[in-house]
Amino acid sequence: MAIKYDKLNFGTAGIPIAARGSPTAEGIAKVNELGLSGMELEFVHSVNIKEDKTSPVFEAAKKNNVELTCHGSYYINLSSLEKDKIHASIDRVLNAAKIANMCGAKSCVFHAGYYMKRSPKEVYPVILKCMKEIVAKLKDENNPIFVRPETTGKGTQWGELDEIIKLSQELEQVMPCIDFSHIHARSNGKWNTLEEFRDIFTRVEKGLGKKGLQMMHCHISGIAYGEKGEKHHLILKESDMNYKDLLKVFKEFGAKGIVICESPNIEEDALLMKRFYDKL
């Protein structure tokens, strides 16, 4: 099973600012009007689209040729030390994945968990067990959506690239969401050069094959960071995020998929990246 993309799509994290306050379907139309082709449904605080309201979203995405993804709840911790929190987290992933799929989204992204003062080797099997349960439930429900743990911006959070690649090798319907800004922030300023970007893409291709590059889901924004990692998102031009060299590597590797902009000025930076990329 694989997602098919015919190009690299650029989009916004949520309804564009120019359409804030509008229904989701109208936000999707605005994405198209702006010249973009992707949008991430923001389910970060709650799944804010009811089951009986998904059809207009699905139709708007189809009509406007906009690729949809969703960002699941911030309140997910598959590695919690409390079983009830793990069960609640699994339910939150599945609920977001269900509604996102009904809207036509191909991916559901989320921050998977925390190390909770444990080693990566201790936490990995805990995350793996939960993800197995999630994938099994998706299959039972005939839901083809891909669930994508996101590379995280702080060292306390589970979600280094190699951990997520390994998880994606072990399970169907699991692939990474690569947040390049998080990788940059987590390392307190590294992973921001042409060669370092090439290394990331090479690791994805080596671990997941060509499909890893043909169905990418990525986040790019400006970001503030310190010794403990991510602080908050910034506008690209107000940050040191080397997005130009990053986009050159997207082109170099022939990558396809979706790039979601999480900068505070979501559509402006999404268009900035798209226009630069289109000139390469």
Image: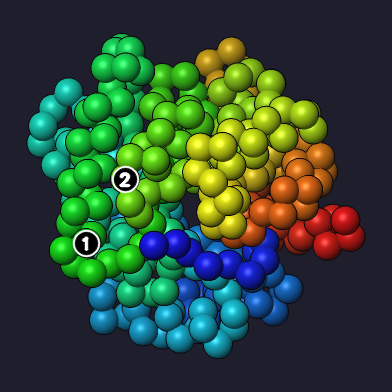
Residue that sits furthest to the right in the current view: 279
Q: Quadrant of residue 123?
A: top left
Circle 1 residue: 139
The reply to whether residue 116 is in sight is no
Residue 270 vertical position relative to residue 68 in the rendered view, above or below? above
User: For this rendering, which residue is in front, 166 or 197?
Assistant: 166
Residue 132 placed where, x, y %?
Answer: 22, 44
Residue at the image position 65 percent from the left and 77 percent from the top:
32
Q: Could you say whether the residue bearing mark 1 is in a helix, strand or loop? A: helix
Left or right: 205, with 96 as reference point: right
C-alpha distance separating marks 2 and 1 = 12 Å
Which amino acid type is marked by label 1? Lys
Quarter of the image that includes the C terminus: bottom right
Residue 122 placed where, x, y %?
Answer: 26, 17
Which amino acid type is marked by label 2? Leu
Residue at the image position 32 percent from the left and 17 percent from the top:
121
Mark 2: few/some/many CA within 10 Å (<14, 14-19, 20+): some
Q: Could you say whether the residue bearing mark 2 is in a helix, strand or loop? A: loop
Residue 165 placed where, x, y %?
Answer: 45, 36
Q: Does the residue at mark 2 contact the one at mark 1 (Cβ under 8 Å)?
A: no
The reply to whether residue 63 is in sight is yes
Circle 2 residue: 171
